[in-house]
Image (spheres, helix red, strand yellow):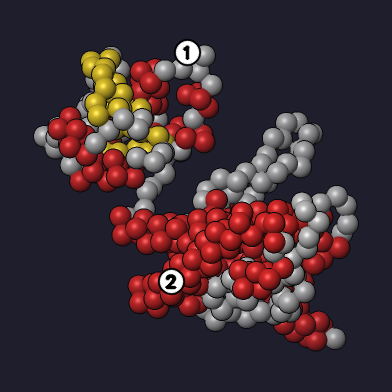
Amino acid sequence: MQQHTTNSARMTVGLDVSDRYSYLCVLDAAGEVVEEGRIPTTPAAIQRRFPSAERMRIVLETGTHSPWISRGLEELGHEVLVANARRLRLIAEHDAKSDRVDAETLARLGRADPRLLAPIRHRAEGTQANLAVVRARDALVRVRTLLVNHVRGAVKSVGGRLPKCSTHSFPRQVGAAIPDELRPALGAILATIEQVSREIRTYDRRLAELCTDAYPETASLQQVPGVGPVTALCYVLTLEDPARFPRSRAVGSYLGLRPKQDDSGRSAPQLRITKAGDQMLRRLLVGSAHYILGPFGPDCDLRRWGLRLAARGGKNAKKRAVVAVARKLAVLLHRLWGTGEVYEPLRRAATIGDAVTATA
């Protein structure tokens, strides 16, 4: 009760952040609006408007600017709540939506009960910088894929066909198969693909160095077949601290790999996954799950369990199995990270075999 009194005795600020200007609404202890206005979305303006002299509770939504704004305000001594924008339908579906109204709504929600905001915690500045390296590599990979698909599509449109080859060797392998009439159009694209591949290799070396020097815990995650340096590093940087999750199973929900729920009475429809959390890490885990269930995946508990799910048949059974394996993989990686255990591919199978032997 004393904590509630302390919080309610100070100002509560709702900050609706936009790219150029941020709108603010300040509520006093009684919930009355004492100030409204806007300030430039710059570090200097934020610091001038919210000096450290008076501690406030400041509420803003997740967004491009929320990491640096929240860190700067916390350094000034303020209590900062970063609201999960996915959970604030009250703002997104308001029939009189405006920046001013959004700022006041944030302030009132923060004053009433911070749990209504489903507040998130931003990563540390160093972690964010290292994660930017992973995202930059990911952007180059997607650009290269787009360019390769463009070249293949252009050749098919004139009746040609390019040989199958790996993406990194694509410019060398297909150069001779490009029709003469398309060489002026596609020559520069092939050169760009080759340059992008060189840059990706540079990023790969940088990520390997980060794994070895700054994040040695990624080695325990890479014990699992299908989990390489990129996936392991992205996992560690995204979650940042395994102690954030009281149970390993919570990681699946955090990464948006659990099905949505819309139960009512006896109705419990099967829905798609929530797709909350980090999109890149979710995509990497799904890619690892594809490898585990694919023709080159080694025998392990995850593979056996996923193949049983896929064998049940029904529409989209294989897709659901891949997502389910990705979710279990996320849980497994968290356990390996938190405990430092040695990965046992057939741990469950061995346990069942021992139980059968003991029974016999």
Counting from the top left corner in percent of width and height, residue 190 is at: 58, 63
Q: Is residue 329 above or below residue 81?
A: below
Left or right, residue 218 beside residue 19: right
Give the spatial CA distance, label 2 vs label 1.
Answer: 50 Å
How many marks are shown on the rendered structure?
Answer: 2
Which residue is more in the foreground, 66 or 189?
189
Quarter of the N terminus within the rendering: top left
**Residue 99 falls in image quadrant:** top left
Counting from the top left corner in percent of width and height, residue 243 is at: 42, 61
The secondary element bearing badge 1 is classed as loop
Q: Residue furthest right?
A: 313
Sooner in the amino-acid sequence: mark 2 or mark 1: 1
Q: Residue at x 28, y 40 (%)?
A: 69
Q: Residue at x 79, y 34 (%)?
A: 266
**Number of residues whose C-alpha sits closer than 10 Å to that of mark 1, classed few (under 14), some (14–19) or many (20 or more):** few
Mark 2: amino acid:
Thr
Q: Between label 2 and label 1, give the one nearer the viewer.
A: 2
Mark 1: amino acid:
Ala
Task: Find disc 1 in the rendering and name its residue.
Answer: 96
**Residue 320 falls in image quadrant:** bottom right
Counting from the top left corner in percent of width and height, residue 223 is at: 56, 78
Q: Residue furthest left?
A: 53
Q: Is residue 133 above or below residue 121?
A: below
Res. 101 in view: yes
Residue 202's label in the rendered image is: 2
Which residue is more in the foreground, 60 or 343?
60
